[in-house]
Image (tube, rainbow, N blue to C red):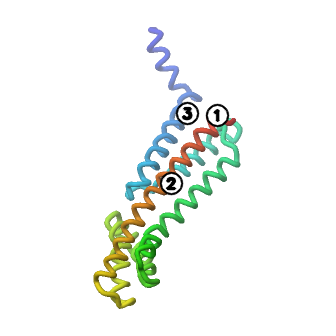
Amino acid sequence: MNPVIAAFFDSFSGDSFYAGTLWAVVIILMVGGFLGTFLPVLPGTTLILGGTFLFYFTMGREASGLAWQGLVFIGVLYLLSILLDWVSGALGAKWFGSSKWGIIGAIAGGIIGLFFGLPGLIIGPIVGVFAFEIFFAKKEIKQASNSTFGTVIGGIAGIFGRVILALGMIGWFIGDVFFVN
């Protein structure tokens, strides 16, 4: 048999096929997670965390090269990304002069927006701030618009922060697997 063809069929043998498939899935999760940090269709840092845990527990603790401290650090970065996701729009609204009602509106709009998919995730906090500022805080349209603009700016800053946290998660994973252990 031709050596190239034999090598091709040998690559489908047990351990190497398993490891190759595992690496492919982990890479897809990491890349998809990174893309998900600025595309709200994908659960960004959740995919990165999932890929990390998949790699750690399927490769075995020793063979994976990941230390438990690395898993904890990646988990902390994940929790920070979730926290940032929840508060970025509200903090932006507050920065631009929103009242407590506007901040409550941003949070309520974000929660309600979850049920309407991608458009709801984007529009929910914006509509929430504007509506709560008009109806509960009794602000004029111009003041409510400023708070709403702050929500948009806060959301953009939140995306930027999540990208940085996602890069930190991926960087720590790569460093721990290939360079530290």
Look at the picture and state if 34 lies above or below 125: above
Of badges 2 and 3, nearer the viewer stands 2
Cα separation between marks 2 and 3: 25 Å
Label 1 neighbourhood size at 10 Å, few (<14), some (14-19), many (20+)? few
Viewer-side residue, 48 vs 138: 138
Contact between labelled residues 1 and 3, with CB atoms less than 8 Å apart: no
Residue depicted at x 67% and y 40%: 60
Element type at mark 2? helix
Which numbered disc, 3 or 1, marks the residue that appears first in the sequence? 3
Describe residue 60's horizontal placement relative to residue 141 as left or right. right
Element type at mark 1? helix
Describe residue 82's horizontal placement relative to residue 159 as left or right. right
Which numbered disc, 1 or 2, marks the residue that appears first in the sequence? 2
Residue depicted at x 43% and y 78%: 108
* Label 2 sits on residue: 45
* Label 3 sits on residue: 18
Identify the disc placed on residue 170: none
Residue 118, given in percent of the width and then of the height, sits at 34, 63
Answer with the quarter of the image where residue 170 lies: top right
Label 3 neighbourhood size at 10 Å, few (<14), some (14-19), many (20+)? some
Viewer-side residue, 28 vs 130: 130
Of badges 1 and 2, nearer the viewer stands 1
Answer with the quarter of the image where residue 148 lies: bottom left
Of badges 3 and 1, nearer the viewer stands 1
Identify the disc placed on residue 179: 1
- Amino acid under disc 3: Tyr
Residue depicted at x 48% and y 64%: 85
Residue 10, given in percent of the width and then of the height, sits at 52, 20
- Amino acid under disc 1: Phe
Which numbered disc, 2 or 3, marks the residue that appears first in the sequence? 3
